[in-house]
Each structure stands twice: as C-alpha cells, then as structure tokens.
Amino acid sequence: MVKTYWKNIVVFLFLAVIPVASSGQNIFPGAEGMGTQSPGAYGGSELPQIVVVDNLHDSGSGSLRHALNRPFPRIVVFEVSGDIFLESPIVVRVPFLHVAGQTAPGKGIAVWGHPFVIGTHDVLIQDMRFRLGSGHQKQSDCATVRGTSLRTFNVVFDHCSFAFGLDETLTILNAGPGITISNSIVGYSLDGLEHSCGLLVLNSFNVSLIRNVLAFNGDRNPTIRGDSRKVEVINNLIYNSESHAIYLGSRGPRNYPVDVILKSNHYITGPDNMNRFLLSVHEQVADSLNVFWSDNTTLHKGRLQRSYDLQLFDKSNRFTPVSQTPFTSSVDLVICSDVLEDSLLSSSGARPRNRDAVDSLLVSNIRQREGNIIKDEEELGIPMTLPNETKGFEIPDDPHLKDANDFTRLQNHLQKMLEDKSNPFAREK
C-alpha cells in the first residue's frame, strides 16, 4: 500500500502505527492483534473504577502496586511522573485492567528493579517503561505474561518500552489465547549473566507481535518455541542480533504444528552480528511447519536481501514456506518492509514524542548503525533518571457514557492522549 506513494510517506507512516477510532467495542479504538477483541477493563460485571497513582512509592496508598492489586475492574491513571523502584516483583492477578501510562505528565513512568508479571486476563498496558537492570543480579525477565489458557489471556502491551532484562527482557509463557505486543521497543537485554535475550514465546497460542523494535538483544528476536501455535510476527524491525533474529525453536512435548505468519519484517545486521539470517530453524523443530512468508527483508553490509532462501538458516532441512496463511491474520494495515525502519523508529515505544534517554540512544544507534550489546546498563553512559513531575488528571464528564464509535468518553479521551504523545509530527500545545 505504501510502495507507490512516496510523496505521502510521512503522513502514511504515522497513520500506519497510530490506531484510529473504529466502530464496535474493543480493548482500545483501532486496536489490532489477537486478544484485542476484549473489552478490557469494561469486561467485568461492574463498570471499572478510576484509580489514581499519585506517588512513586513501591507500595501503599496511591502507589502503582496498590492500584494494580485493587479487587475490581479498574482504569489506572497517573498524576505523577518519574521512576518507580520496586522492592519485590509485581504480579497482577486481578482481571479487567487498563494501565494508562499516557496520563502521566512529563516523560512518563519507568518501573525498575524487579520483574513485572501479568497472570490474569483482559489487561491493557499502554505507554509504560519497564527496566529490570543489572542490580537485580538474578537471571530474571524484565516483564512476563505468564499463566495457563484458563487464567492468562486477552493481554495487550501497546506503546511500551522494555529494557535491561537478565533472562528474557519480555516473555510470553503458557499464555493465551490472545496476547498482543504492539508498537513497542524490546532492547538492551543485558549479557551480564550471559543471557542477552529479547522476546520469547513459549507454549503460548494466538499471539501477535506487531510493529515492534527489537534491538541489542543477543538472541530471541523473537523465539517461538515449544508447543506455541498461531503466532503472527508482522512489521517488526530487528537490529544487531548476535546469534538469532527470528528463531523457530525446538518442539514441545505435544509436537503441535508451527502455524506462523512472518510478514513485512526488516532485519538490519549490526556490529555484534555473527548471524546474518532473518529466520533460523532449530534442528528439532516441530514435525509440521506451516509458516507463511511475505515481504521480509534483511540489510547486511549494505546489501538488501528479499528472497527467503537467502535469509534462512535451516538446521532442520525441512523448511519451505506455505503459500497461504495458516490462520486469518488480525492485522489489516501492513507497512511495506522498505519503509518500516523510518516508521517504527518514529512511532514505537513509550511516548515517542518525548523519549527517555534509553530509547533515544537506541533509536539513534539504529539510525547510525552503531552501538553494542551490553552487560550492564551503565555502559551506555547516559543519565537514566526521569524527571519527577505532578499534574492532576481531569476525568471527562460522564466518563463511561458511550460515544458514537461505541467506546466510552474515557476510552476515547485516553486514546487521544496516547496519540498526542505518540505522534512525532503533532504540533505542541
């Protein structure tokens, strides 16, 4: 769709990554991805309550942890910005939740020091930063979506940034149906414990990875492994993956078919690369491979590869792409891989219009074809503290009243706030 109209590329790039309102209830207006058909915080037996985070404490009244643990459907809004340093992991177990990080003033919120875990259903997290950090000292994920098909489903992370994991930076484990990671950044996975890994999908199903940037992760960008099935990897930008970029890993005990859509992804090799292949296939991958391949490209040493056989490292000796998608994709608007880099570097991650130093450096390094995989976040040599600001959140009149697009006034208000902070071409107000 974008191949011909280069003169309109700036406008298209924004529209392609920032959802617009559509008819019908969904987890947010214009959402794409499996699990986004959920009404999210509005899916419970009662209307969600608006819970305010007004401090950066680990716990107690007004803290993020306190808001997440409320025993009712809730929409979490912020009247403070800055860094939240956790004293223990956060595990979210109460369903019907929307964490609206876009409501925070200034540069927003970053959560540090311990894993952030979703172990429930009908959850939307937007415009948040999750940074584990080398101080954790244990091989742990930065963030995890974890559970069983009876407990963890319809979970969406949108416009978030994840960094400094010590196992995976982001893991989807025993989850589904319906997990989406969209418009996000997964980067700088730490190699201090010799395990710099980006994004793992393990024993999970109906998973969408859409319009994400994965950079400076030694491996797993992403890896799809075990008894995972129905995974779509669409419009992702991968940079400087040392060993594997997209990796179809070893089979699980049930040997489920590998049903995967790989469409319009772009891989750029970098200074640490030992592997120049966009797709690697494990020698013990599942017996049945139903992988659809379309418009995936690799830029290696200035040469652009388009043919799948030049982008494939197949230890199974059994990989041949199928001609039809093995399931119906959840993504309607797909960006051509030729222009994917500019699009995602302008619009992915937490508040692209006002990035923090970590995301700013990551984006700059990709553009300049610089940077390295790191063992400790201090190697980046940048200040990482977010400014602490406060500003009251103004609740719309009749917040739960539905507008013409079938979303509530509050949902539309929050989406407008997200778009204002994600659109790199918007005028300052």
Image: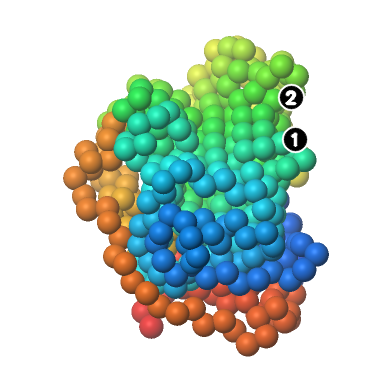
On the question of residue 110 being in view, the answer is no
Exactly how many numbered labels are in the figure? 2
Q: Which residue is mark 1?
A: 326
- Which residue shows up at 32% across the image and 36% down it? 134
Q: Nearer the viewer, residue 305 or 184?
A: 184
- Looking at the image, the residue that sits furthest to the front is 60
194 relative to 381, above or below: above
Residue 313: x %, y % from top left: 50, 19
Q: Nearer the viewer, residue 282 or 410?
A: 410
C-alpha gap between disc 2 and disc 1: 10 Å
Q: Nearer the viewer, residue 331 or 429?
A: 429
Q: Which residue is mark 2?
A: 257
Residue 195: x %, y % from top left: 40, 25
61 relative to 149, above or below: below
Numbered disc 1: secondary structure: loop
- Which residue shows up at 57% across the image and 69% down it? 51
On the question of residue 59 being in view, the answer is yes
- Which residue shows up at 60% across the image and 41% down it? 145
